[in-house]
Amino acid sequence: MIYFAVFIYLCCSVGGLTLVKVGAEHNNFALNPGFFNLSLSYATLIGLCLYVVSFVMWIVIVQKFNLSYIQPITTGLSYILIIAASIFILKESISLFQWIGLAFILIGVVFMNLKVH
């Protein structure tokens, strides 16, 4: 059950960030003396809601795991998923150094999960 919480956390975190990025071009922000205007797109609002859900899930997750174990793993996995979302959803190009960094992250996630006594 707790691994399902990690899965939900990662989906909400990555989905939230991706939707905030998608909606960012339609947002409007103005700060004038005595006047504040903020207009957010639906994609941004849904992204923010998902990000709040991911924060709540994170609280549940850190109650169940050692922080020194779960933080590096979820951070590494979220980096990998963000790059995948950037490629497939946002149509961003990834440089050679980003691919190399992604490989190191993936290797690190694997090493974090090895059970060596």
Image: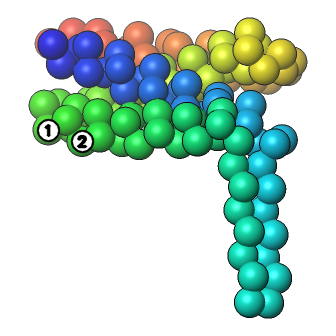
Q: Which mark is residue 59?
A: 2
- Residue found 83% across the figure and 16% down from its top: 91
Residue 71 image-quadrant placement? top left
Q: Which quadrant holds the C terminus?
A: top left
Residue 80 image-quadrant placement? top right
Q: Is residue 72 visible?
A: no
Residue 5 image-quadrant placement? top left
Residue 68 at x, y = what percent?
A: 27, 37
State the SS at label 1: helix
Q: Is residue 1 visible?
A: yes
- Residue found 75% across the figure and 82% down from its top: 35
Q: Please, is residue 24 above or below residue 114 in the view?
A: below
Between the residue at mark 1 and the residue at mark 2, the CA separation in whole angstroms equals: 6 Å
Task: Tell me whether the residue at label 1 lies in contact with that at label 2, contact meaning CB atoms closer than 8 angstroms.
Answer: yes
Q: Please, is residue 110 above or below residue 98 in the view?
A: above
Residue 34 at x, y = what percent?
A: 74, 89
Asked whether, in this view, residue 16 is left or right of residue 24, the answer is left
Front residue of 111/55: it is 55
Q: Amino acid at mark 1?
A: Gln
Q: Amino acid at mark 2?
A: Ile
Residue 100 at x, y = what percent?
A: 72, 17
State the SS at label 2: helix
Asked whether, in this view, residue 50 is left or right of residue 81, the answer is left
Q: Please, is residue 32 above or below residue 49 in the view?
A: below
Residue named by callout 1:
63
Q: Which quadrant holds the N terminus?
A: top left
- Residue found 41% across the figure and 10% down from its top: 110
